[in-house]
Image: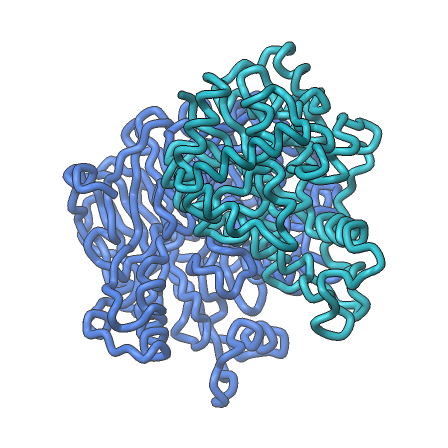
Chain colours: A blue, B cyan
Amino acid sequence: MSDMAKDHLKAPEVLAKNGLGHPSSAVAQAFALFDGAVYLGASAPRASTAEDAARIFRHLPDGASWTPCYTAAPRRLDAAAEARLAARRPLADATGAPETLAEAFGITCFAPFEGKGDGLTRLYAGTASLFGPGLLRSGPGGAFEDISAPPFAEGDIATGALQSFQGRLYAAPRGEITAEIDEAAAPRTARLYASDDPADPESWQQASRPGFGTDLPGEIVALCATHGHLYAATACARKGFALWRTEGGESLPHNWTQVLEAGAFRFAQNMMAASLCAFGDHLYIGTGIPGLGAARTIDVAEAAPELLRIAADGTWDVVVGTTRISPDGLKVPLSAQGPGFDDPFNAAISALVEHDGALYAGTQNWAPYAAIHAGEGVPLQGGFQLWRSLDGESWEPVLDEGAGEVTETGIRAMISTEAGLWIGTERHTPLMRLIDRMAGGARTELAAASTGFSVLKLA
Amino acid sequence: MPEPLFIIAPPRSYTSLIGGMIGQHPQIYGLPELNLAHTETLGGVMATLKGPIAPLIAGILRLLAELHEGEQTEDAVVRARAWMMKRAHWTVDRVFQHIQEQVGDRILLEKSPMTVMNVEHMRRRHRIFPRASYLHLTRHPVTTGTSLMSLRETMFAGGAVGGGEAAPGRPARDPENQWRACHENIEAFTAELEPGQCLRVKAELLLSDPEGYLAQICDWLGIDSSPEAIEAMMHPETSPFACLGPPSAKFGNDPNYLKNPALDRERIKKVKAPPLDTPITWRSDGSHFAPATMKLARQFGYG
């Protein structure tokens, strides 16, 4: 980013820090505006102890503090959870598995919805868990309760996306997204369920045929309702993401039409649709590579993300990204910016939101990890970036380098409020310290750094 | 003068056919393979293109003969070689200036596969043409390798393929390694370019609808994409370099292409994308592609 561009950068207000007292809460993953309050879903993706728990906090507009609404309870490890834990920790030491883990380690998404038996609009939350994905529902006083989850399969670990549409709540379960799973003899395919009464276990039905009726691999990771359609975006390490949509209707499963295929013809380099957001006349899609973006565990080379957009008629453009030919014509980035907003260290455009007439895009940035891997002599630099556009085509920087904290590597969630734009971050300081030690380093700035997510506000 | 267009791809990536087609656009001059990027001067070119790779000098000889005398006879090629020897001190930059002066305001199109064997070759040429356009062609690694082995067997009929076997069951110069190394060089080089300066294209996709995709390439280059211009591109055989040359400068391009340069729509309809994860046919050890090759192939949309 040029020095001239940096002149425009603002200093945000800090609304939460240090994972709100839980250092292992590394990710502020989901926001919702509900019943006059901001709800925050936090995740502890390490998922190795009972302290690594999914948490929900509430913040009233006139209040100065966060109220805990939900903390996943400890649960004794079963064989399936132990196997999933072992798969996620191949380099774990010989101390063995813990006796208990948190029932869920993450809150992945929120959706306000009134089910037939709810009596009023409730806030639903999807969870990530080594015991299998779940669904929470807000009750009186803002507390959350476990309710029935949509059917899930072996290997599922998260309710990846929730969306209300035409009187139903839609939920997409998913597993880990890795090349190894794509390579398996029976690769995982997209599944989507719908219910008009989510608390009733019998109410969940398939909203699409598995894989949308194709044999294409890839699981649904994002949902968005706009243009009178429900859109579902997938992740696939082998082929690149795809985007499907349906007009819905009473009968299930719905008829779906593929809007984008093969990572919008950037193939595996557009592995995942990391974020969706309607803005103006278009649906915007931020792509990316999950995890830390360094692509060491996922067999996709480093590839900075793109920002794409879809019109109601299904035509599409590259806004930020790579020039290419396609069956739909020549695609030239409308912003004249290359992948990652011209920064190869951006791994994902991980959050998109409309606020005060502008579209905001937050990134995950792996430059700090690259510096740590490179060794002690390489200065720590990088951190998340926030970009803004009034027309969806011309973009300007708003925040850079983790807003001054290099360990703030990602923006994972944003929400527009009357008080300003709220930004939920991702910060894995303990992991950075570990990588630093493995690289032979002892960086004092990491020893002094905060741990856990932050919530920032731009007025 | 217009900025040149370079096709960058490993050998056997349909560069001859696609380069031949693009080179027939009325605003483009399609060059034979010049092989100038690995050195600084004409003298360096003559000093290095010797021995087993001596045939690689045919392209520049045929071009100079054609530009200077309007024909590519043996005598004209001999005079072209003499012209080069007198100008051994000329830099590659000056040689391109000379070519451009002869060709006029048409875009020069060049596609020597040797350029991508080393990322420094591409960087050297880029220092001369920092605003050039680059068309990165990809082809499935299985069919690229099969095609390369077939060519080697043709050229070295009766002899060892690729200089004998380096390991049991494997040719010494395994096509997989060449495919991956060339593309890694290209990826490293193109990462340094401005957005939009390089267009990566699956050759199979382009050949599935040449009129449609060549029109997009014209739009990318900012040149005429009218039906007349596209029709001209459907006839690579009309290039003065789309045939075998005289005895001392016979090639300058893929020998098979020079024997049959016309667009064969029936043949390109048969272009297939085989699965990536199958035993490699040019090896006898039943092995598959390395993970790094698979990774790169998937970035390009294969498998």
Where does the image place residue A26, in percent across and percent down from the top left? Answer: 35, 63
Does B48 sit above or below residue A339?
below
Residue A364 can be seen, yes or no: yes
Q: Is residue B300 left or right of residue B97?
A: right
**A368 and A278: which is toward the camera:** A368
Name which quarter of the figure residue A187 lies in.
bottom right
Q: Which residue does the image show at 67% across and 62% down from the upper left?
A: B173
Q: Which residue does the image show at 50% across and 46% down from the upper left?
A: B45
Does B121 sit above or below residue B70?
below
Where does the image place residue B159, in percent across and percent down from the top left? Answer: 80, 61
**B292 and A212: which is toward the camera:** B292
Q: Is residue B228 left or right of residue B48?
A: right
Q: Is residue A210 left or right of residue A394?
A: right
Q: How many marks overall?
A: 0
**B212 and A367: which is toward the camera:** B212
**A413 and A1: which is toward the camera:** A1
Residue A264 can be seen, yes or no: no
Where does the image place residue A290, in percent across and percent down from the top left? Answer: 48, 55
Quarter occupied by the N terminus of chain B: top left
Name which quarter of the figure residue A414 lies in.
top left
Where does the image place residue A243, in percent across and percent down from the top left? Answer: 59, 38
Does B24 sit above or below residue B286?
above
